[in-house]
Amino acid sequence: MAQYGASPVTVQKALRTLASQGAVETRPGVGTFVRAVRVARSHDYGWQTAALGPRPKPVQQLATSLHTYPNDVIALHSGYPDRELLPERLVRAAFIRAARSDSAVTRSPAAGLPDLQAWFAAELGAGSPMGVAPPAPSDVVVFPGSQTSLSAAFRALVGVGRPLLVESPTYWGAILAAEQVGVQVVPVPSGPRGPDPEVLARAFAQTGARAFYAQPSFANPTGARWSPDLADEVLRLVREHSAYLIEDDWAHDFGITQAVVPLAARDDGGHVIYLRSLTKSVSPAVRVSGLIARGPARERILAGAQAESLYVSGMLQAVALDVVTQPAWRTHLRGQRQQLAARRDLLLGALREHVPDAIVEAVPQGGLNLWLRFPDTTDVARLVRDCEAAGVIVAAGDEWFPAEPTGAYLRLNYSGPNPGAFPEGARVIGKALARQG
Ligand SMILES: Cc1ncc(COP(=O)(O)O)c(C=O)c1O
């Protein structure tokens, strides 16, 4: 005003114009300033190298199952079912109801919504024979997905540097969780019928392990389902060694020709820690799972869960509970079973036609995967690369081995998008294999 002899109104107008052009910025209560010009420059995070120090172990790359690809590929790698297999209408309606409920604005109890705890307990208890006490709702801890409960169970029951027996091959995420927790992973070979109980007994005796992580029903990746005799024998072994079986029942809702009866239903002595996930069957966006444990083990796991994340979003728990208690949920599961059977058989048939050198040791009676063995001379990494270059995404079996892979395998998931392209996918795998001579 003084310099140009202008009125306050003129100066204010000029400032407004400059602000709208981005030339000045007004900081309320401080004044108006010429805006600093942001210049693009490269990041420099070099200081973190010194701050973090040596890397404890090679950091695992993002697992193939979690990669996302453009939708014009044939995706046989994914870990989560395609949306056409999900109860989408039920999920959307449940979100609308939950948004109107108190769960949208309240904190849920640390161990989970009581009604959801009761549902998880009732589901497991339905399989309990006479003479075995079914679990109580208060034995349940709700988690934001089974992945988190794996870490919590390994941390609470095994501890840093202590041995944890795992099937080999087994779920890559369990291997990752165990490594992050710092437990010592001890592989126990497991085939299409599960582990050999004699080898398992030796592993318990030699390592003094207190826990065995396993998937007795439709294991990821092998599809193996334990016989009732093997289940009895493993239960006997964990009792004899005062140990825990951490039973990951991830495929409970994906039985095709057989339903799942969890081992945990047959134990009321606190030896089985039971994990049941809803993220694959309800929706990958509803990350909710239940862990059932009895006695001090549950208290320790709950304490760990609280330290990690306090409690699970009540909104997501309300949605999950709403979906699984609708009468339409059972109808959905029946339809899904038929779709999974058709998809599995379509992929199997195509593989037999186009990749006759690959072997599926046992046709899975449930789950979402085929575990395909190739001749030992196969270069799996090259096979995966060649398939990807031809637009077919597959996962190398190596990721499922806790130690060195004992064979050349691919894991193919038949619950992904566009099953009509499975035959083309198999043809591409066959061609890529043929190129290796
Ligand atoms: C065997 C197994 N356990 C656990 C999980 C993780 O489940 P969630 O999505 O509930 O964390 C998966 C997911 O791929 C799985 O395959």
Image (cartoon, rainbow, N blue to C red):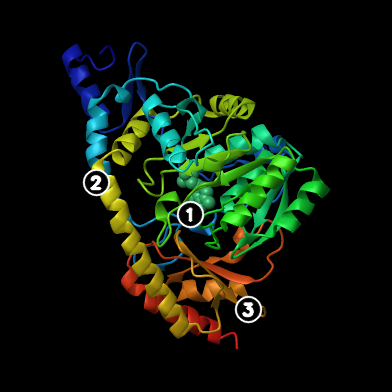
Q: How many residues crowd around disc 3 within 10 Å: few (fewer than 14), some, or many (20 or more)?
A: some
Say if disc 2 is inside 8 Å of ligand 1.
Answer: no
Residue 390, percent from left and from top: 44, 76
Residue 82, percent from left and from top: 35, 57
Question: Would you say residue 59 is visible in this rendering?
Answer: no
Label 2 is placed on what type of residue? Ala
Residue annotated with mark 3: 378
Residue 426 left/right relative to 305? left
Q: How many residues crowd around disc 2 within 10 Å: few (fewer than 14), some, or many (20 or more)?
A: few
Report the Cα–Cα distance between label 3 and label 1. 24 Å
Q: Residue at x 59, y 35 (%)?
A: 152
Residue 66 left/right relative to 404? left
* Image quadrant where one finds the C terminus: bottom right
Q: Earlier in the sequence, mark 1 or mark 2?
A: 1
Disc 1 on helix, strand or loop? helix
Q: Nearer the viewer, mark 3 or mark 2?
A: 2
Q: Residue at x 25, y 22 (%)?
A: 15
Report the Cα–Cα distance between label 1 and label 2. 30 Å
Label 3 is placed on what type of residue? Thr
Disc 2 on helix, strand or loop? helix
The vertical placement of 428 against 33, above or below, is: below
Label 1 is placed on what type of residue? Leu
Residue annotated with mark 2: 328
Residue 395, percent from left and from top: 53, 65
Residue sitting farthest toward the bottom: 437
The vertical placement of 412 against 317, above or below, is: below
Q: Nearer the viewer, mark 1 or mark 2?
A: 2
Residue annotated with mark 1: 66
Which quadrant of the structure image shows residue 259?
A: bottom left
How many marks can you see? 3
| Badge 3 vs badge 1, beta-carbon distance below 8 Å | no
Residue 282 left/right relative to 121? left
